[in-house]
Image (tube, grey):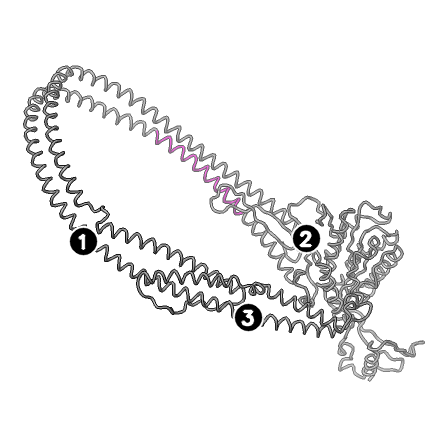
Amino acid sequence: MASATTNLESQILELERLRARCVSARDAVSSVRRRLAELTDQEAELTASIHNRHESELRAQLERMAQDARDRLMQSEHDISSVREAAAESRERRLNELAAGFKEDVAAIRQKLQSELWVLQSVCDESNEDTPVREAERAQEVFHTQQAFATQQLSDLDARLQFTEKYLAHCHAGTDSTIPPVNVAIKGREASHTLAMEQVDLALAAAVAIDRQNLPQWICGLRIWGLALLIFVVVAIVATGVRADLRLFLNPELQKPDWQWLGVSSLIGAATAVLFGTVLLVLVQSRLRAGFEDMLQHVANARSALDYWSQKSQQELKRVEAAADTWKTSMQQHREQHSAKLQHAADEQIHERTRAYNELVARHEKQSLEQIAANDAESSRQQSAVEHWRGQEIARIKATLKSEHEQSLTALATRNAATRKSLHDDETTAIAQWKADITLARELARTSRERVTAFPRWSQMRGSHWNVPTSLPEALPIGDLLATLPAPPQGDSREPDANLCLEMPAILNFPRDTSIVIEHDVAGREPALEFVRSILLRLLTSIMPGRVQFTLIDPVGLGQSFSALMHLADFDELLISNRIWTEATQIRDRLQKVTEHMESVFQTYLRSEFESIEDYNAAAGEVAEPYHFVVVAGFPAAFTEEAARHLTSILTSGPRCGVHAIVTWSPNQPIPRSFDINSLRESCTEFTVTDGHVVPRLESPSSAEFEALVPPDSADYVSLVRAVGEQSRDARRVEVSFNRIAPKPDAIWSLCSAEGLDVPIGRAGAARLQFMRLGRGTSQHVLVAGKTGSGKSTLLHILITNLA
């Protein structure tokens, strides 16, 4: 969308179009992702089904094969079981007798060894309370406890130091936070620890003393500016009241106030505020910085003392641990030597008893093994044959079923891969279009903001912060548009449900869209008028002084709706056509004058040379025609048939010659028969008041929210109006360069006065000069009249110079 043609309606339509496209893209992405999830679930289900079918078939065939193998083995086992059982019973009985005797002898030997080792362990136990090892552990525990506590104290102190430093900066007393050198003597390990804790307490006490000072609270943050402003206002008011009557400043219509003394009083107030603020700031800074330096000194002392204590404590711990290690090594060597001797003796006894037991067992084992060897050989042969057959069958079954399983999975993966690729392509296309639409929405917001960068907010235009415009605006901001668009997903998030909130100024192109109609009911009258007042103030502050005039019509409010604009009459009555019109005859006559002005523009200025007043003004330069706004509050109240016809002419033909209408109307009131309400709606940008809010009137509903421009408070409104009036005081004074009317060098002394005088004295429109013609018919004499400063002498100088 071209930024030069962007207006409120196109903004809303474009936002609605982009929102619909984003919603469609979001639905498409969600649909694709649901289908992908369903495809994944279906693939998992089919894979599980194939796997389960494979496992079931494998289990069934393996079970049948295993049953056959069991039947064969059971028959073989039954044949040799009787012989094996008899031999086993005889063998087990004798071996049990030998093992019982052996276990009793070994247990007695080991019981004796354990008793002797326990006695040795109790003598060399390092866990006794009076051993050097326990002393080292207690010393280390005490050190770590004290070190943790001191570290925590220093951490808390550092946090408190940073907080205090920020507090000083907040109170405009920032200072160097470099830690100073230590100024206390550190002697002894325990004394250094005590000194560190004392310095921490002193530093915290200094921080508390800084916090308890009441005087810095008066200047912290922006309060010093508030205090200075209060002193300035009080002193300025008192000084003004000493010499001048304050009521004259509140109601300047009674008598002209002494503005010069007000300026002197303001200087006195400013000087007093600066002096008082400086003294207070210096006093607070000296107190805070002194306390902060004490705190830094205590912090430096505490850190140094704690480092000294930690170093000495580490040395003491190393000494105690070295003594404990020496004692532990000695006890361990002693215990190992005696334990080895006892263990060796017990091992020899057990070894001898084991040798005798093994000889007896070996004889009986040899007899048993020889007896069952023949049966075991036959059983092994039969089992080997069965196992060989079983292994071959298992390999054949697994190979067959594995091949079938892999073929099923490959077919499923191939089929789903094509479907998944198609879905991913659809998702990529939808997200790309989605992001492109979001980019268009952001670009629309950016271009809209760029078009109105020259329009500050009301709060930024207070006092002398309003800059007088030097050119006509291309557009006017009349509020804000808030739109919520679905945001594209980030990464691989499953649900693209995030939203993007955009805010942009609502724009009306100037002057094409500045004919406005606001439809309201009784409850919506005040919001509609407030919106109109905002637009009027925006026009006043956005168009060069003197290049805009108003005709204000308020039959319902009797002029109260636009009373603040009457301040313009103090500077130039033509800015608001002398007054606010309220009576039916006044309204009719005033609208007739506006239409007569339009006729003059059409017939005198535009003719067939210029398409619109903008083209004419571009050529006219200093004699450009001002824009004229007819503002009607409460249409059709007090409108006669003739007044309604004049308003129709203004609506249909006025924009071409710089005349625009801003109308608030209630559909509940009867409209004059000669007035076609469609001409009002078709010629103007339409708004309506809904639930107390002014919103654009659209053919279809929109999700974009419109926040209408709100006027500043009454004091700032009047201040801005008067500032515009002051700048417009001399705006109608036109100064035409003498070179425009002076003859060209080749035309000097080329005319003759035999038939009369024809002298150019100024400009008459964009391309013609105004002549004073004498000597034809009754035009023989000239009378020049005007008040002081109106240009009589200048006119005579021009006549003399051009005649010469």
- The span from disc 2 to disc 3 (Cα, nearest Å) is 56 Å
Question: Where does the C terminus fall, quadrant-wise?
Answer: bottom right
- The span from disc 1 to disc 2 (Cα, nearest Å) is 91 Å
Q: Where is residue 642 in the image (x, y as percent from the top left)?
A: 88, 53
List the residue tagged with mark 3: 283
Count of residue discs: 3
Q: Is residue 414 magenta?
A: yes
Q: Above or below — where is 581 with respect to 465?
A: above
Q: Above or below — where is 573 with respect to 676?
A: below
Quarter of the image where one finds residue 260? bottom right
Towards the viewer: 567 or 94:
94
Residue at 66% x, 69% y is 232
| Numbered range of the magenta stretch | 405-432
Q: Where is residue 562 in the image (x, y as percent from the top left)?
A: 79, 58
Helix, strand or loop at disc 3?
Answer: helix
Q: Where is residue 720 in the image (x, y as percent from the top left)?
A: 72, 64
Say whether disc 1 or disc 2 marks the residue closer to the N-terminus. Answer: 2
As drawn, the label of residue 326 is: 1
Residue at 25% x, 18% y is 68
User: Residue 749 vs residue 467: left or right?
Assistant: right
Secondary structure character of the magenta stretch overall: helix
User: Residue 801 vs residue 17: left or right?
Assistant: right
- Callout 1: few (<14), some (14-19), or many (20+) C-alpha neighbours within 10 Å? few
Say whether disc 3 or disc 1 marks the residue closer to the N-terminus. Answer: 3
User: Residue 673 vs residue 447: left or right?
Assistant: right
Q: Does the magenta stretch include residue 526?
A: no
List the residue tagged with mark 2: 8
Tell me the amino acid under the disc marked 3. Answer: Leu
Helix, strand or loop at disc 2?
Answer: helix
